[in-house]
Image: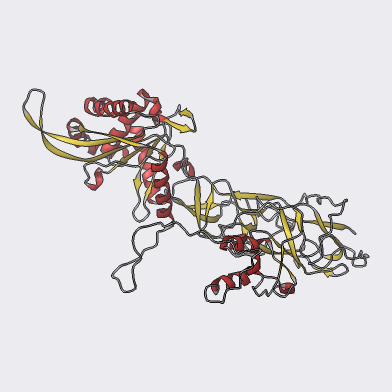
């Protein structure tokens, strides 16, 4: 028969300890596999912890209310039902917390069970976070490799994220609707479901408020407060974090009725208290511990609130639109935008395209557009002026050796996406056209991958398809420039021989980051693109 050591599980990547809020078993009790052994609270979540073994509980190392570091021994279970249980080490929650047992050590990991952390993926080079729009699996569910695990939305794309491995969902750390920074752990997979991994939460950790600050605690006992009756009350780290966020002092918290064990205030109790806080009589202030005043939220708009009955429609932003708004503000706050604008005589290219487009369609299976010529001209300019193909990191200039050209694609109902033509400097105009066609089709079908959207070094956008003459676009961070063209219109133009001719004219805008690109460089870059478009011999490009 074997004795199994139970250690304090890690309830999240940034969590270093947990508070034991309730033992469901005492020394001498028998317990079944997956039966609840104890409840643990952190500043993020309250969870019931199932037993990874069947047997008899022979030892509990800490009392209810004790805060214990991750990995420390908290209990022992013996397979032998006749094993002798030691005297309880636990004491009432209100008593001082006992020091950890000197011989306590983390239990050896079960070699049959492995875990894999799922982190928020980076959906593009300039993307710093993503919003979880839907979980397709819940804790306890099985998932196959490449089966859809969740859906993520950014300002550029909405993507279905497949599971990288097969296994069982052990924990989910963020709820649907929460925005999570790239690289943070969002879920855990147990790779061998037949070996029960200790610490699996019975509910997603995402039920905790996203704004609650993560506390890095020590092995001191959990916080208590003096209730109005004079008794000392225990509060879980989660409730404490929620109270701090809501500006509720310990003295006010003492008036909250708790429905948990020994009158403990649960997350639900505190939420009910907040819901009625404004209508309930306020407790008299205590001079020694005044309630912390919650700072007023900054005004987000100068537009007055509409009254009921006004002829208005309020449409909540979807996740993509929210992310677009955040990133556009961030770009304007980061880069001092400068715009150089000039007109391009596209007459030669218009005539060539009209005569060649049917042959091109027959050869390639898709239409030849002016965008293909413009992309080619931009690549030539980026080769000539490599600083435009750079980015800024603090006080350093990062010059990219590869030209990865982003192309803005409008997706009806879903905003804008910017897939990237990788290695554009190694492609001729036909290669650029083929790559762009593949990316546009994938974008319209919502099949773009993370790789399709990452690594861009410069971006092109075309407003001409909307009949617009010119525009000044916002730079896609961390790039330093973006090129925009308008529609092509016939106009009378005075030629060099002072005659008047009807020409096909297009406006072009180069928006650039004035931290590095001055007016001279920005304008020279624009002029290089224009000269290439006006002087190229397209018959030699295909």
**In this rendering, would 92 be left or right of 290?**
right
Q: Quadrant of residue 167?
A: bottom right
Residue at 36% x, 27% y is 382
Residue at 77% x, 60% y is 66
How many callouts does the rendering have? 0
Residue at 39% x, 46% y is 328
Farthest left residue in view:
499
Q: Quadrant of residue 348?
A: top left
Residue 507 versus residue 268 in the image, above or below: above
Image quadrant where one finds the N terminus: bottom right
Residue 171 position, x and y percent, is 64, 58
Residue 91 position, x and y percent, is 84, 66
Image quadrant where one finds the C terminus: top left
Residue 120 position, x and y percent, is 55, 49
Residue 488 position, x and y percent, is 19, 39
**In this rendering, would 269 be left or right of 230?**
left
Residue 385 versus residue 469 in the image, above or below: above
Residue at 22% x, 45% y is 468
**In this rendering, would 106 be left or right of 289?**
right
Residue 196 versus residue 395 in the image, above or below: below
According to the image, what is the colour scheme of the structure? secondary structure
Farthest front residue in view:
287
**In this rendering, would 499 be left or right of 114?**
left
Q: Is residue 194 visible?
A: no
Q: Is residue 323 visible?
A: yes
């Amino acid at each position: 028969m074997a004795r199994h050591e139970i250690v304090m599980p890690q309830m999240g990547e940034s969590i270093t300890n947990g508070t034991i809020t309730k033992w469901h078993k005492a020394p001498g009790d028998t317990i079944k596999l997956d039966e609840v052994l104890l409840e643990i609270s952190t500043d993020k979540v309250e969870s019931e912890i199932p037993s990874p073994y069947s047997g008899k509980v022979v030892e509990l190392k800490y009392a209810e209310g004790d805060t214990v570091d991750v990995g420390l021994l908290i209990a022992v279970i013996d397979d032998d039902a006749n094993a002798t249980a030691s005297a309880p080490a636990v004491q009432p929650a209100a008593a001082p917390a006992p020091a950890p047992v000197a011989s306590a050590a983390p239990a050896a990991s079960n070699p049959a069970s492995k875990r894999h952390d799922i982190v928020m993926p980076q959906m593009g080079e300039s993307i710093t976070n993503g919003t979880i729009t839907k979980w397709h699996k819940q804790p306890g569910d099985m998932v196959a490799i490449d089966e859809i695990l969740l859906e993520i939305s950014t300002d550029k794309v909405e993507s279905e994220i497949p599971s990288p491995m097969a296994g069982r969902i052990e924990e989910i750390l963020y709820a649907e609707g929460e925005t999570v920074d790239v690289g943070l752990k969002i879920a855990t997979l147990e790779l061998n479901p037949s070996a029960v991994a200790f610490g699996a939460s019975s509910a997603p950790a995402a039920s905790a408020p996203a704004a609650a600050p993560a506390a890095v605690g020590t092995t001191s006992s959990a916080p208590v407060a003096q209730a109005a009756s004079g008794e000392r009350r225990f509060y879980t780290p989660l409730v404490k974090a929620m109270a701090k966020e809501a500006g509720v002092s310990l003295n006010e918290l003492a008036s909250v009725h708790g429905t948990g064990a020994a009158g403990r205030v649960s997350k639900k109790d505190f939420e009910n208290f907040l819901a009625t806080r404004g209508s309930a009589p306020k407790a008299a202030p205590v001079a020694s511990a005044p309630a912390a005043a919650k700072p007023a939220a900054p005004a987000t708009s100068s537009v007055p609130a509409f009254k009921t009955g006004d002829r208005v429609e309020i449409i909540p932003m979807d996740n993509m639109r929210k992310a677009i708004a955040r990133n556009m503000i961030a770009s304007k706050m980061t880069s001092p935008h400068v715009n150089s604008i000039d007109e391009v005589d596209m007459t030669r290219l218009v005539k060539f395209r009209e005569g060649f487009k049917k042959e091109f369609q027959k050869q390639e299976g898709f239409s030849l557009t002016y965008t293909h010529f413009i992309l080619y001209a931009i690549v030539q300019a980026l080769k000539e002026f490599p600083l435009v193909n750079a980015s800024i990191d603090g006080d350093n200039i990062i010059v990219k050796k590869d030209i990865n050209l982003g192309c803005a694609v409008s997706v009806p109902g879903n905003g804008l996406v910017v897939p990237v033509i990788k290695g554009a400097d190694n492609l001729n105009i036909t290669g650029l056209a083929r790559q762009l066609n593949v990316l546009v089709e994938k974008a319209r079908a919502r099949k773009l991958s993370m790789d399709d959207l990452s690594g861009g070094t410069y971006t092109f956008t075309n407003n001409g398809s909307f009949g617009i003459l010119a525009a000044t676009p916002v730079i896609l961070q961390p790039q330093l420039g973006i090129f925009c063209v308008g529609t092509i219109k016939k106009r009378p133009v005075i030629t060099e021989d002072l005659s008047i001719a009807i020409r096909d004219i297009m406006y072009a805008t180069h928006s650039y980051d004035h931290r590095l690109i001055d007016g001279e460089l920005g304008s020279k870059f624009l002029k290089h693109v224009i000269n290439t478009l006006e002087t190229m011999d397209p018959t030699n490009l295909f």
